[in-house]
Image: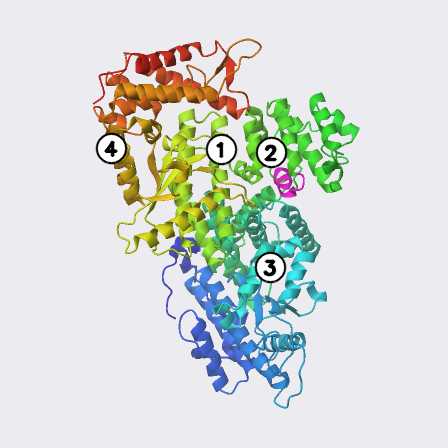
Amino acid sequence: MRSLPETSANNAGPPKACLPLGAKAEHSRFVQRIRRRYADELALLPPGLPGRDGIRALIDTLRGGGRALPAALRVARQLVVERLAVLDVEAQAPLDAVTLTMSTLAEVTLDRALAQACADQDARHGVPQRPDGRRAAFWVLGMGKLGALELNVSSDIDLIYVYDEDGQTAGNSDGRGSISNHEYFSQVARTLYALIGETTEDGNVFRVDLALRPNGNSGPPVVSLAMLEEYFLVQGREWERFAWMKSRVVAPASAMTNGEALPLRDVVIPFVFRRYLDYGVFEGLRQLHRKIRDEAARRAAGRPERANDVKLSRGGIREIEFTVQLLQVVRGGHFPELRTRSTLTALERLVAVGVMKPETARKLDEAYRFLRRLEHRIQYLDDQQTHMLPTDDADLGWIARSMGLVCTADTCELLDTLCTHREFVATEFDALLHDGRTVGAGSSGCKSCGGPPPQLDGEAFLERLPAAIAARVRTFCATPKVAMLRDETKLRLAKLIGRAALAIDQLQIREDAVLRFIDWLEPLLRRESYLALLAERPEVLNRLLRLLGLARWPMRYLMRHPGVIDELADARALQGRFERAAYLRDLNERHSAWTRGGQADEESLLDTLRRAHHAEVFRTLVRDVDGALSVEQVADDLSALADATLDCTIRWAWQHLRQRHRDDPRFAVVAYGKLGGKELGYGSDLDVVFLFDDADEADADKAAEVYAAFVRKLITWLTLRTAAGELFDIDTALRPNGNSGLLVTSVATFERYQAGRGSNTAWTWEHQAITRARWCAGDTSLAPRVEAVRRAVLAAPRDAAALRDEVRAMRERVRAAHPVPARDGQPVFDVKHSEGGMMDVEFAVQTLVLAHSAAHPALRDDVGNIALLQLAEAAGLLPPGVGQAAADAYRELRRAQHRARLDEAPTQFDGDAFAAEQAAVRALTRAVFDQGAGPPAA
């Protein structure tokens, strides 16, 4: 027998040093039986793992030798499984090679049987027709392990039969025998069962199970696509979503490549994956699993050997599959990359999106491979669909040796390893699928645990709450929204509010946090998935309460974007800083997943961008409120996030522009204002200018039209409010010629425009704006040209006195537009607009840059106000200490403004507040505007 190549560590095969334990496939009674009965036919299968072409050729050879199709299919199956037993037991064939071969065997035999069944019915009744006269399509869907290419060696196959449209057959050659398409395909289904599922003297090909079809065993054997869609909408149950997640067309073979089954995909995906984080599915899976465990316990009653069922018992294969599928279904609507049928591939992707810890996934991977390899060896013994360990010592010892383990009367490494894996799987599964009642450590004093569930508006429940919270709950219950809720939802609310109240003492949170939590709940009452998330994940509720206790603004953000609450599920994601490369990598992987699924439409991509951006903003917000980031770091991260999001949006939107004339646009976004200065705050507008390069365009006018159309699309992508919320507000007023100018300008025109205004103090406000301009997204080759224009404007010669007068006049106009009225007759200090505030610092810095960049090139760098003040002082443009003091004052005023906005407090304080900071800023203003800082401008 030709040996297999070395398997990778990921295949979880035992080390080669273990193999001399010496298990042979001939111990299998199934192998013995096949070798006796089909000794002459064994040589018909070429050496090595049977592939698709080899299985087809084997069937053809058997047919050519005089066997009818049913016999040829069955004998082919016996020969393939015998080969797998040898390769698996004696050569340690990788698990995925074994399961892929079995799945391929099912596909090939079903394709052959379907072709025969349709030919038989065509002869009797003619071709089934759609209303347009074309042949109606029929699809055999593989569910479960067949759908996932994970079929085990003695498995049945779960099938569902679907045809695309109702109609009538064309009738036979005599013009008679016309029947409905439904009748035609029902007869095809019966023939398929006879060819594949019936047991003959050669056995069967596969046992066929149709119980997963709509309405189960009480439903028709075949359904039309319209019937299936209606069933999903009206009757589809939660557990069926898990079954359909692994569905796949397995026959006819042509349907897997010609795209005719795409309408089926468009019906199934919305049923399986919701457009929101679907924590409501937990209870559906919990009920299903409870039934499976109860059934397993019933079967094991009085039969202790049945407790060692490697599939259905506690910690078995099914619990690994449920763990993975649950996380896929919950998040698959948002993360299309999780929409994979393979259990092991899904584990890798769950780690990649941060849903599962790498160590947990590694151990589940090892357990799954071990249990599946063990399952196969159990089935090799007698070719029975069983998952229970044998009780015979010889069989148990053979299985152990075939896995590189020892099992004797004194010690059994097989059972020890099995117990270790099962215990880990069961622990992880129970932690994920707990009943939602756990409050957490230290909750033994829970007065509502046990006994009847709390009633939201019940006096007994309200009496246990602090007075302020009880009063808020009474008001809450009196609203029509709450009164109309289902009883189940009210019970869930009572549990959540009760836990929140307990957290005041247990987690040392403020009472305000619970009141804000109730305020946050009110607009989300119809979105039960978020309530389910908090019920299922107590640690998320605890983190949410702590966050709400620290500031008010997070509640507003959560109200606008409730989906980001899922970010609280993984504490690791809330640490560190924003990482552009990781963010873009995740978005690109998501785009690839949408493309693979044929769903990379604009709506999906717009929602994807918004969810990703909202999640990153929320992570920064949590780190900010938690004190892990300074104000400057928050602004840096939000600005870098905006840059990355703009860059990604440009690439995606360009691919959806019908008029695009090249693969990649020669296009750039220039940031101004807060984004340009990397001082972006939460919810800040983006001040931007759009540029394109037409230097290598054969038709410059045509290029301008294309880029104009692109900018209109890009602005829509950036500003449109979708079901996932909004992304940015865009302000393009700083473009050449302002609001009367074109939305997008060529780089050459931008250069000429700025050069023409370089020394003209009539355009000082534009010069002030360009001090904070920078390339931020798009074609990187345009960045040096944008920066060169900016530096040329800054270095242009100016009349310093005229410049100071113009800036001073501009400052007075801004101050007049933002008056700061007295409060109770007492002066008020606004940290931004009052004299001595942040605006004074910004105007002073802009004046220094415009007046002295020609002589001091370091001032041309876009390094932020604080660094520029320090550079100006170091260059002798400010009196000693003035620049540093103003920089420190600006930092403190920004911090005060930031803190106030986070807590939705006013940014106006008593007049004598920040006295030292006001004095430092006034000193800066005098030095720049009254004393004419530094030497005369060039």
Helix, strand or loop for disc 3: loop
Residue type (three-letter) at the residue carrying disc 3: Thr
Q: Estimate the x, y position of residue 542 in percent, counting from the top left.
A: 59, 31
The span from disc 1 to disc 4 (Cα, nearest Å) is 32 Å
Circle 2 crowding by C-alpha within 10 Å: few under 14, some 14–19, many from 20: many
Q: Secondary structure at mark 4?
A: helix
Which amino acid lies under the numbered mark 1 shown in the image of this protein? Gly
Residue sitting at 70 percent across and 66 percent down?
219
**Residue 553 tag number:** none
Callout 1–callout 2 Cβ contact below 8 Å: no
Disc number placed over residue 792 in the picture, else none: 4
Label 3 vs label 1, nearer the camera: 1
User: Which amino acid type is marked by label 2?
Assistant: Leu
Mark on residue 541? 2
Q: Eyeballing the image, is 22 above or below 483?
A: below
Q: Earlier in the sequence, mark 1 or mark 4?
A: 1
At which x and y percent is residue 100?
47, 64
Range of the magenta residues? 525-535
Circle 2: element type = helix
Horizontally, is 428 left or right of 709 in the view?
right
